[in-house]
Image: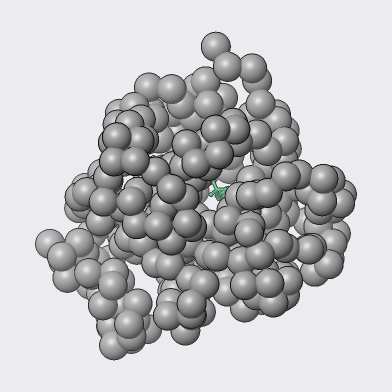
Amino acid sequence: MAEKSKFIDYIDEALEKSKDTTLSHLLFIHQGVHYPVTMCTPETFQALDAFEARSDDVVLASYPKCGSNWILHILRELIFADSKKKYDFPEFPVLECGDPGKYQRMKQFPSPRILATHLHYDKLPESILKNKAKILVIFRNPKDTAVSFFHFHNDVPDIPSYGSWDEFFRQFMGGQVSWGSYFDFAINWNQHLHDDNVKFILYEDLKENLAAGIKQIAEFFGFSLTEEQIQTISAQSTFQAMQAKSQETHGAVGPFLFRKGEVGDWKNVFSETQSQEMDDKFKECLADTPLGAKLKYNSYCLA
Ligand SMILES: Nc1ncnc2c1ncn2[C@@H]1O[C@H](COP(=O)(O)O)[C@@H](OP(=O)(O)O)[C@H]1O
Ligand SMILES: CCc1ccc(OS(=O)(=O)O)cc1
């Protein structure tokens, strides 16, 4: 059994805080976006402004529930294969979560550091953009993302639950959920998809061909791996492999973070009206954008 990590300690702490937090008190607004009080604070956001990024930081951006824990695992394995050093990062990996002192402590950590974030592009600390750290941004179709988000809230015992899927759907569509609107997040990132230091990947593409996705990620960050190493990481990163170890890697919340790992689960949950409402929203916000095309909405979100 692996030693209990700082990551698990942090999750346990956040869950403990969640126990005493009702849904109506879960969110606060910072610069127009909702965040959960159990994970983020105004003091940490203030400290984040002065965060010093490095050009070799490995940034992983995503809206919640688009597979960030999956890609984090892949990145750690890639760094290990490339450097032969175990990637050991004694802080919660989501940049904007934690106490304000974390950025000071992070100055001591060796490169490359993995910085996961759910921030909209225009909320990233300036130094990430100035130092041109490479940013991998993972997207997932909005219908499965919403269903995964709903289950996360309603299945994890200590996280405040919604009264029903219908109630969650309403809040999700209005952007009144943690890290705000999926659509605002997407519109914001859409403008930077073709920046030199940004690489887009799609959850559904990874599901289709994991080894090809891992190879692309390795190339983007300049990690040098053999075909055999790629195949090994691929085998260790399937949903089944990660779910089997989830309690060991992520503690009590593990089985909920690695829930189903499927494409199309939304069909079990969305009503026809809700599906149409999301199709309309997609058309209005994203359909005619480069990101809209990359999301392959017609393949994954039309019944
Ligand atoms: N190896 C893997 N393959 C496919 N999906 C994975 C995965 N690891 C995690 N996921 C899925 O990613 C979602 C969680 O995202 P995040 O890590 O950003 O919180 C969950 O979706 P589901 O709830 O649909 O199962 C989870 O099952
Ligand atoms: C409890 C509210 C909450 C916490 C964490 C979330 O996202 S993630 O698991 O860190 O990606 C979302 C909502």
Q: Is residue 200 above or below residue 232?
A: below
Residue 238 appears anywhere in the view: no
Given residues 230 and 254, the one toward you in this image is: 230
Of residues 66 and 135, the one drawn nearer to the viewer in this rendering:
135
- The percent coordinates of residue 20 (x first, y second) are 72, 37
Task: Using the image, determine if residue 263 lies above or below residue 132.
Answer: above
Question: Which residue does the image show at 15% across and 65% down from the upper left?
Answer: 299
Q: Which residue is drawn at the image coordinates 43% and 67% (left, top)?
A: 199
Q: Residue at x 27, y 45 (%)?
A: 211
Instruction: Using the rendered image of the protein, determine whether residue 226 is visible from the camera's viewpoint.
Output: yes
Is 160 on the left-hand or right-hand side of 107? left
Q: Quadrant of the N terminus?
A: top right
Q: How many marks?
A: 0
Q: Give the x, y percent position of residue 223.
A: 47, 50
At a point 22% along the width and 49% down the height, the residue shown is: 209
Residue 10 lies in quadrant: top right
Looking at the image, the residue that sits furthest to the top is 1
Its colouring scheme is one colour
Q: Is residue 8 left or right of residue 155?
A: right
**Residue 278 occupies which quadrant of the picture?**
bottom left
| Residue 62 relative to residue 132: left or right | left
| Screen quadrant of the C terminus | bottom left
12 w.r.t. 293: above or below = above
Percent coordinates x, y for residue 174 in the rendering? 48, 71
Q: Residue 100: x and y, percent?
A: 84, 53
